[in-house]
Image (tube, helix red, strand yellow):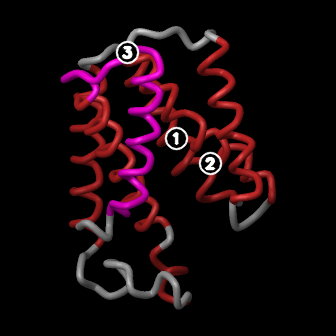
Amino acid sequence: YLKLIKWRLSIAVAFSATAGFFLFAGELSVQTLVCFFGVFLMAGGAAGVNQIQEREIDKKMDRTAGRPLPTNSLFVGQALTFSLLSIVTGGVLLSRLGTLPWILGLANIFFYNGLYTPLKKRTIYALLPGGLVGAIPPMIGWTAAGGSLGHPNILYLATLLFLWQVPHF
């Protein structure tokens, strides 16, 4: 299950959300942990859905052939159940911090699983939703701490992370 949720990547995403939280709040709190775990679970669930979406291609690539679905260490039903439970649990945690962090979390799943994943095999323009996926987590943290999305500080950080996704892609 740890491989399914790409735990290292999901932790990195949760830390970027935590950075956004800390930038606004200026201190760590119980809400910081709620934000961290909410984003971690949603990111992990989205990563699991991504592996379901790409399971046939993953079988053919050396880098991904050892993932849980190509190796049959997990079956699609198990992966889907675990991924959806992670997304829902993470969403409930984020909703405790406000509607906007929850909506941003759901939007990020849509951009990642609904746009980026299917588009990346077809067009270079997949980098646009992919860039948003990288830019949104600090915005989740910022708004979870009570910040406004229109504040220049979070917009600068989100823009930097968005632009960083282009060479990363």
State if disc 2 and disc 3 touch (CB < 8 Å). Answer: no
Which region shows up in magenta? 5-32
| Type of the residue with mark 1 | Phe
Dividing the picture into quarters, in which one does residue 22 lie? Answer: top left
| Residue toward you, 107 or 134 | 134
For mark 1, what is the residue? 110
Disc 2 on helix, strand or loop? helix
Left or right: 5 with respect to 167? left
Residue 51: percent from left, percent from top: 43, 67
**Residue 107 image offset from top left, x and y in percent:** 51, 33
Q: Percent position (x, y) of residue 115? A: 62, 48
Of residue 130 and residue 55, the one placed in the foreground of this image is: 130
Q: State which tag comes first along the sequence, 2 or 1.
A: 1
Tell me the residue at 30%/36% (across/down): 36
Estimate the spatial distance between the alpha carbons at disc 3 and disc 2, rounded to whole Å. 28 Å
At label 2, which amino acid type do we have?
Answer: Leu
- State left or right for residue 77 relative to residue 161: left
Q: Residues within 10 Å of mark 3 (few under 14, many from 20)?
A: many
Q: Is residue 153 above or below residue 9?
A: above
Q: Nearer the viewer, mark 1 or mark 3?
A: 3
Q: Earlier in the sequence, mark 1 or mark 3?
A: 1
Q: Determine the residue positioned at 23% across, 67% down.
A: 1
Residue situated in front as seen by the camera: 39 or 25: 25
Please tell me which of labels 3 and 2 falls first in the chain.
2
Given the current orientation, which residue lies at the most extreme front position? Answer: 27
Residue 44 in magenta stretch: no
Name the residue tied to disc 3: 145
Q: Main secondary structure of the magenta part?
A: helix
Q: Are marks 2 and 1 in contact (CB under 8 Å)?
A: yes
Residue under circle 2?
Answer: 115
Q: Quadrant of residue 9?
A: bottom left
